[in-house]
Image (tube, rainbow, N blue to C red):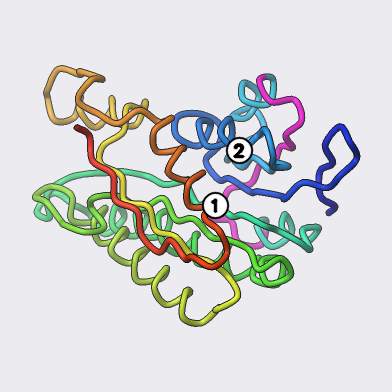
Amino acid sequence: MEYAADESGRDRPLALITGAGRGLGAAIARELAADHGLLLGARTAAGLESILAELPGATSWPVELTDYPAVAEAVRPIDRLDVLVHNAGIADLGTIAESSVRQWRETLEGNLIAVVELTRLLLPALRATNGHVVLINSGAGLRANAGWASYAASKFGLRAFGDALRLEEPSIRVTSIHPGRIDTDMQRDIVAGEGRPYDSAQFLRPETVARAVRTAIDTPRDGHPTEIVLRPR
């Protein structure tokens, strides 16, 4: 796969964003679109139609991230990658007493194991550019609350993965971003499950978190932004 070119014919860096069809992923895509070639990931091509109509220069990259043979095939053409943003994830909440083995497995699979495998497969492409891995983590990756055990475990694991990757791959920058709760459709579902009215003013805007991704990526190469923590005001 080749870099995307801008109007002057110069190559632009290439970024792959998972979970890019809506919410925070779409906001990150908008933030990077001006100066990056974009591969936008989602489970299905249909899930990317809206953001691709908005960003016609982007490329659809539909794949189910827990279908590992399909992921291996999807990454095969990518020989150089500057930025990998792991944004896709799930939030299936409940107390430990209520949680099933299935819930734990699916949460760890979606939020951690799929991230590890996609990163592993793309390491040669990231090494080729001294690239940057951005892990969209959570406040739950720093502190576990009641009712969030499986989700927090997946995010604590994601933080550990990022820390180990940073040490094992010194040519690649790795940034863990820990935002508080974000105004997205997923957040609306969570609040509904909590039985509370939804007030978007209580949460971070997706554009604010996307700007933190931009800040990490734009940090000069002599600096390594290892962790960014954001909370709603």
> Mark 1 highlights which residue?
217
Q: Is residue 155 left or right of residue 46?
A: left
Asked which quadrant contains residue 102, the reply is: bottom left
Assess disc 1: are there few (<14), some (14-19) or many (≥20) residues with their C-alpha within 10 Å of its C-alpha: many
Spot occupied by residue 220 in the image (x, y as percentages of width and height): 55, 58
Spot occupied by residue 18 in the image (x, y as percentages of width and height): 55, 45
Asked which quadrant contains residue 198, the reply is: top left
Q: Residue at x 58, y 70 (%)?
A: 172
Mark 2: which secondary structure? Answer: helix
Q: Residue at x 50, y 31 (%)?
A: 27
116 or 180: nearer the viewer = 180
Q: Between disc 1 and disc 2, whose residue precedes?
A: 2
The amino acid type, in three-letter code, at marker 1 is Ile
Q: Residue at x 62, y 21 (%)?
A: 50
Does 134 appear above or below 179?
below
In the drawing, what numbered circle is on residue 149? Answer: none
Spot occupied by residue 105 in the image (x, y as percentages of width and height): 34, 60
Mark 1: which secondary structure? Answer: helix
Q: Residue at x 49, y 65 (%)?
A: 223
80 or 11: nearer the viewer = 11
> Mark 2 highlights which residue?
32
> Is residue 66 covered in magenta?
yes
Magenta range: 54-69
Does 146 appear above or below 188?
below
The amino acid type, in three-letter code, at marker 2 is Leu
19 or 223: nearer the viewer = 223
Q: Are marks 1 and 2 in contact (CB under 8 Å)?
A: yes
Which corner quadrant holds the N terminus? bottom right
Q: Residue furthest right?
A: 9
Mark 1 → mark 2, Cα distance in angstroms: 10 Å
> Is residue 47 covered in magenta?
no
